[in-house]
Image (cartoon, rainbow, N blue to C red):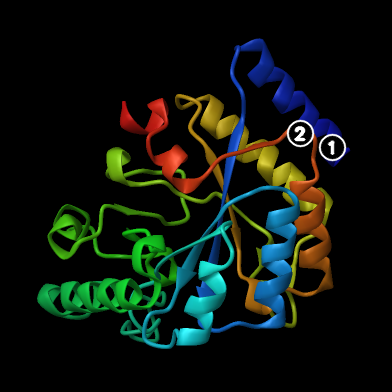
Amino acid sequence: MSRQVLDIELQHWRAAGKQPLLWWRDDDAVAVTPQLKHLSRIASMADIEILLAVIPAYANEELATYVKQCSNLKPCPHGWSHTNYAPAAEKKCELGTHRDLGEVLADIARGRERLDDLFGKSMLPVLVPPWNRMRCDLAPRLPGVGIKAFSTFTHQRSVPDMQVNTHVDVMDWKAPGGAAGKSLDTVLVELASALSVSRANSFYPVGLLTHHLVHDETAWTTLAGVVAHPDLNWITFQQALVHPSTTS
């Protein structure tokens, strides 16, 4: 049934003369791990590029060396230290209004500079806010600290010409007993839903979100099934950023 739901949505795209486009982001990289290597293998075999959100405060030289050898991994800053400054009653946030704006900007600049030192030209000046949240007055100030684009998790785009978001997560963070991978059927239905929203709003690229460090076997199996789907077309973050639906 899930494949039929996706197939019906893909038929709508074909009827409109459009090609559904997906891109991939993975969060929380800090070191070379078996999970990161597995992630890279899956993407490499499918010839898909991943925007790899790296936590600058904890990233090490070994990670930089490994990523430079993997053409399908494009590192970018994931805040500074993935520290929560929000009170317990609020959702977690590192780049929110809980600190002075100058402090937040300084952390972002420090993170970009740290990754620039580690990764050099392979680092993309793209901010991925921890927990996909940041204060609303931050976006117009990002170019001033060397950030040219940002990515969160929502269909809403406050700054379309510099924002490319993710929309489908392979992890269920509210599963009983803790975070768990979603089934392939669930993710295919969510992809169909995200593509439907995109189709109704200028056909923008849909983003897939993964967190390699916490994937269980279900998440890995689902991910492999998604990238193997014959009718899904993958582009890079940079291609998504300049897609006509984004720049218009």
Q: Is residue 179 visible?
A: no
**Residue at left 45%, top 24%?**
202
Q: Nearer the viewer, residue 240 or 168?
A: 240
Give the label on residue 3, or none: 1
Q: For residue 15, which numbered disc appears in the image?
A: none
* Quarter of the figure that contains the N terminus: top right
Amino acid at dot 1: Arg
SS for tag 2?
Answer: helix
Q: Is residue 68 rendered to the left or right of residue 39?
A: left
What is the three-letter code of the residue carrying label 2?
Leu
Q: Which mark is residue 6?
A: 2
The answer to whether residue 159 is visible is yes
Residue shown at the point (75%, 31%) measured from the top left: 231
What x and y, as percent, mark residue 240? 45, 39
User: In this rendering, is residue 104 above or below 40?
Assistant: below
Residue 8: image quadrant is: top right
Q: Are marks 2 and 1 in contact (CB under 8 Å)?
A: yes
Q: Residue at x 37, y 33 (%)?
A: 246
Across and down, in percent, residue 149 comes to 31, 52
Residue 125 coordinates in the image, percent (x, y): 31, 59
Specify few, some or many for label 1: CA neighbours under 10 Å numbering under 14, 14-19, or 20 or more: some
